[in-house]
Amino acid sequence: MLRRTIKKQSTQFFSLLALSIAALGLTHSGISQANDQGANCGVAGLSVCPQPFDKTLPDPHNMLTWNQATRVVGFRNTYRLYEGDVFSTQGAKPSPLMPASSPLPAIDYAMNGKHYSIDNYIANQSVTGLLILKDGKIAYEYYGKGNSENTLWTSRSVAKSVVSVLVGVAIKEGKINSVDDKITRYIPELKGTAWQEVTLHQLLQHTSGVVWDENYASSDSDFSHMTQCEAKPAPYDCVLNLVKSVKRKPGVKPGEVWSYNTGGAWLVGRVLENATGMTLAKYLESRIWSRYGMQQDGVWHALVKDKVDMGGHGFNATLRDWGRFGQFVLSGGQLPSGEKILPDDWIARSTHWTTAKGSVTPSAPNGQYGYQWWYSAPAPDANAEPKKTATSEQTFWALGIYGQTIAINPAERLVMVQWSTWQNAETPSSLYDEQALFVNAVSEALHGK
């Protein structure tokens, strides 16, 4: 995800392609039709059929150029558009998410001299799901565009933060020796490539120095090529060859320059899978999903079913289970049993922002990226309030294109989850400003509650 540190990309490419494919409709012939009763959930092994179960699905080849209505259908059915590995609750009893004792107070934030409410926020952000947890209780919950409590919504790059947490679990278990290990220790086929000298620490912080074009508005970017690979019948070799083929930026050593890189994030997942001998889905299931009290099975996008999952994105779960995952992170990695499965300092290390060139900006003077978690704050010149709260500097973010979000403020014991279908992947940048302003306003409204 490029974020506001890169110049706003032209949306002309999106508009032209969206118009050109509009006549194609939403049909994707490669998806079998299933009945509404859930006899076939589209993925073998799901214990509950997600709803709504849309019968007509979009073509994944066109994911970056779907219009907003198409994106709603595509994002809640992404688990069916690709091969998937289920991460199951294993029948465990869900941990309760009880309603808060009092309703969410009125929310007020300001941008460009205008004041906005929570209803304005939902409209401005094209929100299709919103969950606010305070002290682990539901202060606010909203579903839009036909989504429901058992909709599986796709994470986009929020999955990177999930993988980062799993890396911490693997380090505590001794399956990964250290973030200072070179990644070739776990992925030997990268020897002799641009990735050869990169450590896991640098890979997690996206400071590999390897050139990767993440431009979502270009049909010829590396990210776009990866999207096309994923939609092919045998995606693994295509993605691997793409990621291995990129070059090092001339004169740039690992650790010197920050540049957001989904190809590198996929390699973080490969490090984890090779170190643990499990897919991302299976490791998530065995360590967290079946032990924390999640309410429903989820699906992780697989490049090779039961062998290789997509570490850069591809996590699909319910809104409340996104929230429960946020609660798990807020706790520092503690299960309901009291067992701590993350290193004591893992969250602090994960949110220690890199100051490599490109990470420090006027909005993020101490850096904006850690171990696949973001620092996010309104632009300093934004005519907006509340720009800060007493604890807003402690908020950290899992962010995915088109507005997917988990925001966590440990000091306020606050977790916010957002599903959205922005018109464009990341523009305008004021949408990110608005997210930060909204979380600050929620934090102020709930402070001391």
Image: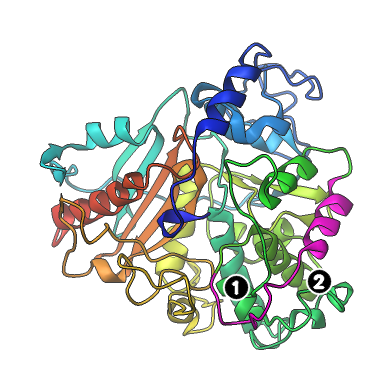
In the image, residue 228 lies in the stretch drawn in magenta: no
Earlier in the chain: of badge 2 and badge 1, it is: 1
The image position of residue 347, as x and y in percent, is 46, 76
Work out which residue is located at the far front of the displayed protein and give it: 250
The image position of residue 14, as x and y in percent, is 55, 31
Q: Which residue is drawn at 46% across and 57% down?
A: 6
Residue 411 seen in render: no
Disc sitting over residue 204 in the figure:
1
**How many discs mark residues in the rendered view?**
2
Tell which of 100 and 85 is nearer to you: 85
User: Which of the two marks, 2 or 1, is nearer to us in this view?
Assistant: 1
* Quarter residue 126 falls in: top left
Residue receiving disc 2: 274
Q: Name above or below for residue 333 compared with residue 318.
A: below
User: Is 169 placed left or right of 445 in the picture?
Assistant: right
Q: How crowded is mark 2: few (under 14 residues within 10 Å), some or many (20 or more)?
A: some
What residue range appears in magenta? 235-258
Q: Which residue is drawn at 16% across and 43% down?
A: 112
User: Is 52 placed left or right of 38 in the picture?
Assistant: left
Tell which of 35 and 73 is nearer to you: 73
Residue 206 seen in render: yes
Tell which of 159 and 133 is nearer to you: 159
Q: In which quarter of the image is the C terminus?
A: bottom left
Q: Which residue is drawn at 49% across and 26% down?
A: 68
The amino acid type found where label 1 is placed reads: Leu
The image position of residue 169, as x and y in percent, is 61, 75
In the image, residue 253 lies in the stretch drawn in magenta: yes
* Quarter residue 142 falls in: top left
* Quarter residue 128 falls in: top left
Q: How crowded is mark 1: few (under 14 residues within 10 Å), some or many (20 or more)?
A: many
- Distance from disc 2 to disc 1, alpha carbons, whole Å, reads 16 Å
Q: Name above or below for residue 216 compared with residue 361.
A: above
